[in-house]
Image (cartoon, helix red, strand yellow):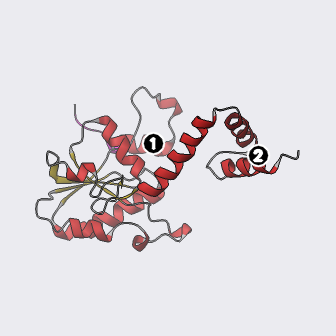
Amino acid sequence: MHYPEPISKLIDSFMKLPTIGPKTASRLAFFVLNMEEDTVLDFAKALVDAKRNIHFCSVCGHITDVDPCHICQDQSRDESMICVVQDPKDVIAMEKMRDYNGRYHVLHGAISPMDGVGPEDINVPSLLTRLQDERVQELILATNPTVEGEATAMYISRLVKPSGIKTTRIAHGLPVGGDLEYADEVTLSKAIEGRREL
């Protein structure tokens, strides 16, 4: 089907987003056409503002509009713990939990030799610099429970071991409310490994 060029460009733009195929892109484009012009302008401005004004914190690597970020500026947070995550979205997930009050370090990826991503391609050097601060007593490795996440956690733990800083790995296993019959072997294995005494 041939669309007028402005709609065609809009559909192509939506298709650049992850998980958006041609049908969804077309629906979104036609939805935008039916929006009020002020709403469309606000939407476009929000896209441009986010792209221009969001950058990475110079301390932890989290996304922010101020530097250092609000978490790094917060004096009430526990400076003795740093939780290492792969992605800024992981920080947001941890913060929603409200149980963790330490600092963060965002790697912006994981070691993946198959994809050509080595330790030098993620935010490891600045982590090692931060660990020279003698206030840091524990490093919590909260990378994803994937082959890449596990390899990254293992790599960092080996780097940190000589410093004497306590290095822990978050537990992985069955979610609360999950059924054993639906769990895969890796999840069950991790659940058994991470068992604790009652």
Q: Quadrant of the N terminus?
A: top right
Looking at the picture, which amino acid does disc 1 mark? Thr
Q: Residue furthest front?
A: 38
Please state the extent of the stretch shown in magenta in the rendering.
193-197
Q: Which residue is mark 1?
A: 187
Q: Position of residue 20 (x, y in %)?
A: 67, 45
In the rendered structure, does residue 194 fall within the stretch colored magenta?
Answer: yes
Which secondary structure lies at badge 1?
helix
Mark 1 neighbour class, 10 Å CA radius: few under 14, some 14 to 19, many 20 or more: some
Q: Nearer the viewer, residue 174 or 35?
A: 35
How packed mark 2 is, by other alpha carbons closer than 10 Å (few <14, some 14-19, many 20 or more), is some
Percent coordinates x, y for residue 107 in the rendering: 37, 61
Foreground residue, 189 or 9?
9
Front-lying residue, 81 or 190: 81
Give the mark nearer the N terminus: 2 vs 1. 2
User: Is the residue 23 above or below the residue 86 in the image?
Assistant: above
Q: Position of residue 133 (x, y in %)?
A: 14, 65
Q: Is residue 78 magenta?
A: no
Q: Name the residue: 22% across, 35% down.
A: 197
**Res 101 → quadrant:** top left
57 lies above or below 179: below
Mark 2 or mark 1, whichever is nearer to me: 2
Asked whether the beta carbons under mark 2 and mark 1 sit within 8 Å of each other, the answer is no
Q: Is residue 29 left or right of residue 146?
A: right
Marking on residue 7 = 2
Residue at 55% over, 67% down: 115
Disc 2 to disc 1, C-alpha distance? 45 Å
| Residue 147 drawn at (x, y percent) | 47, 57
Quadrant of the rendered structure where residue 192 is? top left
Q: Residue furthest left?
A: 134
Q: Amino acid at mark 2?
A: Ile
